């Protein structure tokens, strides 16, 4: 059985929230999207991609086959691209997309495009289970720059892949095994780009409820300036 809680906040700088999340513990589907684009395009891209992927998985999620997650992303990508077609005000809109779905007893399949992240907190420790699709992760890391230089690099937020911006997607996916008490955290870069992993791990290891952990993390990011929208979903196997 999965329990979950999520929070999304505009942060301290931006007036609108281009993050969007869905949490359906009964269906075992959890989705986070971080939109980008002018005017309200980012909000539209995030909501449209997440809703499309959710509806696809609700309809087809129980079907066997390794391609189900990828197909959900493809449907989301097509929906965003169709919505932007012929509309200059929506040109270039896109979004990260992070999806976690229950695929068996204690198994959670996680798929991602962009730089929204998923972490696993278990008895073995705290680990990142997604791969950032950013210039820093895919190009900058090969240039011999230090971790500190990469964290401060002006292109650290430049995505190399996003839903809606290309016809073909590179979707990273993996299935993680969870034991009772383990937690998976989904978050936008407004959280993981502001708080260090030590803070994230200590919060998840605390005795707080899932709701209190989420609210604590959002407030901690805002105390550090909250430069971006902040979204976090915590999923726990109970």
Image (tube, rainbow, N blue to C red):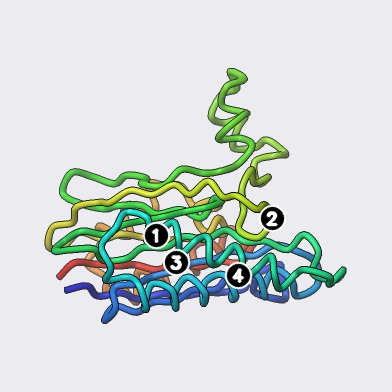
Q: Quadrant of the C terminus?
A: bottom left
Q: Nearer the viewer, residue 110 or 34?
A: 110
Q: Secondary structure at mark 2?
A: loop
Disc 2 crowd rating (10 Å Cα; few below 14, some 14-19, many 20+) is: some
Which of the 4 image quadrants contains residue 150? Answer: top right
Q: Nearer the viewer, mark 4 or mark 3?
A: 4
In the rendering, which numbered label is found on residue 43?
Answer: none
Q: Residue sitting at 72 percent across and 75 percent down?
A: 15
Regarding residue 5, the answer to whether it shows in the image is yes
Q: Contact (CB < 8 A) between labels 1 and 3?
A: no
Identify the residue position indicated by label 4 in the image. Answer: 46
Above or below residue 36? Residue 87 is below
Q: CA distance from mark 1 to mark 4?
A: 17 Å
Identify the residue position indicated by label 3 in the image. Answer: 232
Q: CA distance from mark 3 to mark 2?
A: 24 Å
Q: Contact (CB < 8 A) between labels 4 and 2?
A: no
Identify the residue position indicated by label 1 in the image. Answer: 69
Q: CA distance from mark 4 to mark 2?
A: 13 Å
Q: Secondary structure at mark 1?
A: helix
Figure disc tally: 4
Give x and y (percent) for residue 167.
65, 53
Q: Earlier in the sequence, mark 3 or mark 2?
A: 2
Q: CA distance from mark 4 to mark 3?
A: 15 Å
Q: Nearer the viewer, residue 113 or 15?
A: 113
Q: Quadrant of the N terminus?
A: bottom left
Q: CA distance from mark 1 to mark 3?
A: 21 Å
Regarding residue 225, the answer to whether it shows in the image is no
Identify the residue position indicated by label 2 in the image. Answer: 165
Q: CA distance from mark 1 to mark 2?
A: 19 Å
Q: Nearer the viewer, residue 183 or 133?
A: 133
Q: Residue sitting at 24 percent across and 67 percent down?
A: 236
């Amino acid at each position: 059985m999965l329990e979950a809680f999520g929070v999304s906040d505009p942060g301290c700088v931006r007036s609108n929230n281009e993050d969007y999340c869905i949490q359906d513990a009964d269906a075992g589907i959890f989705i986070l999207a971080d939109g980008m684009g002018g005017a309200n395009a980012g909000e539209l891209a995030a909501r449209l991609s997440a809703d499309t992927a959710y509806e696809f998985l609700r309809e087809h999620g129980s079907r066997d086959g390794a391609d189900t997650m990828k197909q959900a992303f493809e449907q989301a990508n097509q929906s965003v691209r169709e919505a932007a077609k012929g509309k200059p005000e929506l040109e270039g809109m896109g979004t990260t997309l992070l999806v976690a779905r229950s695929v068996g007893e204690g198994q959670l399949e996680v798929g991602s495009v962009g730089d929204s992240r998923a972490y696993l907190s278990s008895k073995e420790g705290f680990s990142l289970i997604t791969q950032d699709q950013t210039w820093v992760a895919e190009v900058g890391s090969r240039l011999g720059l230090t971790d500190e230089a990469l964290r401060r690099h002006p292109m650290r937020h430049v995505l190399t892949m996003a839903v809606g911006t290309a016809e073909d997607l590179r979707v990273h996916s993996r299935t993680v095994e969870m034991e009772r008490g383990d937690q998976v955290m989904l978050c936008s870069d407004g959280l993981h780009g502001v708080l260090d992993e030590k803070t994230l791990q200590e919060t998840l290891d605390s005795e707080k409820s899932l709701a209190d952990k989420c609210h604590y993390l959002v407030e901690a990011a805002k105390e550090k300036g909250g430069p971006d929208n902040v979204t976090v979903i915590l999923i726990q196997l109970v």
